[in-house]
Amino acid sequence: MFSKILYLLSAGYFVSVIYKNYNLLGSIPRELSKASFLLIVLAILLQVVKYLVLAYNFYINFNKTGVNFKYVETLKATFVYIYVCVATPFIGAGGLLAFVNYAGHKRVSKIKVAAGSFLALLADYLGFFIVTIFSLIFFKSTIEDFPVNYLVSMLVFGGILISIVFLSIFKREILIFIIKKFQNLANFFSRNFHKKVHFDEEWAKRNVDLAHECFVDIKKDPYFYLKSAGIGLILHLLNIATFAVVGLSFSEKLNLSKLTSSYVVLNTLETISPTPNGIGIIESFVPEFMYSIGVDFANALVVVTIFRFIYFYIPLFIGFYFSYKIFNGKK
């Protein structure tokens, strides 16, 4: 019952988000008619490969933490993850609910699924970190107009992810202490509003110990995680290639400097934006940034809009379709 209510709420929020940004989507058919058909098809194919690789990254990390999901199952859940990141107003963190809810449906350990998801997301972040450092070193002049506080926020976000894994492996007692504080706060509210305690005294220690079992394998098998981080880098390179192909389809040749810098701006906003996945903000801010580094504003607006449609909105609607089955416990 709870899953159905959650699905209905997420669907309502999703529809409202799309409605608010309908002006962006409404211009897409007209703009696509001006683009090179073959290049647009190529851009879509690049994104098909990207999402197959993204699902594979989740798949191998789930298997590493002892969760034996089938690849096709993981692929469907990955699209739902993308949908829930937008359809729950938790600034992207709600996407993990898709995998955790699916774990409940399959009757496997939710904490193991959460740990596998976490490791896959960390690999994705590390891949983006490499792209960011590359852009800062070689193309500093093209991102000097980008607000430094955004990049700092992105680095802090990554630092938190890495710290959680590090503490889980080497300093469990510190992580248990921190999580117990949040546990006590949650119990305080549940005791006062629901007249019962949701988390027992050993909840924090039990889950940190289980997370430790999932994460400690990184120390035992670092090669695996280097491979996973490499896959994370491939994901971002496929996005950058898609960005370049979309630009070419509108006769806008974006050099490597403009490509990587614009992508760093776009992906940073997608992660730390106050709107889910940067909806609305990316479509307005990124074209302005591209204009500041020498791209015609009208072309920049079209390229960003079509790029986002291919790499984000199409998978979002696919996730909306699969979400009903997963949220309602269907295969």
Image: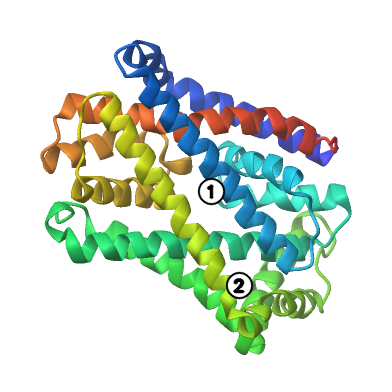
Name the residue: 19% across, 50% down. 257
Residue flagged by tag 1: what amino acid is it? Answer: Gly
Quarter of the picture containing the C terminus is: top right
Residue flagged by tag 2: what amino acid is it? Answer: Phe
Q: Which mark is residue 92?
A: 1
Relative side of 166 to 10, left or right: left
What's the CA distance linking mark 2 and mark 1? 26 Å
- Residue 124 visible in the displayed image: no
Name the residue: 79% across, 74% down. 203
Query: Quick one: SS at disc 1?
Result: loop
Q: Residue furthest front?
A: 38
Q: Nearer the viewer, residue 195 or 30?
A: 30
Q: Earlier in the sequence, mark 2 or mark 1?
A: 1
Residue 141, given in percent of the width and then of the height, sits at 11, 57
Residue 96, given in percent of the width and then of the height, sits at 65, 52
Q: Give the residue number, with chain letter if any, for mark 2.
A: 224
Figure quadrant of residue 134:
bottom left
Relative side of 201 to 291, left or right: right
- Residue 201 visible in the displayed image: yes
Figure quadrant of residue 143:
bottom left
Quarter of the picture containing the N terminus is: top right
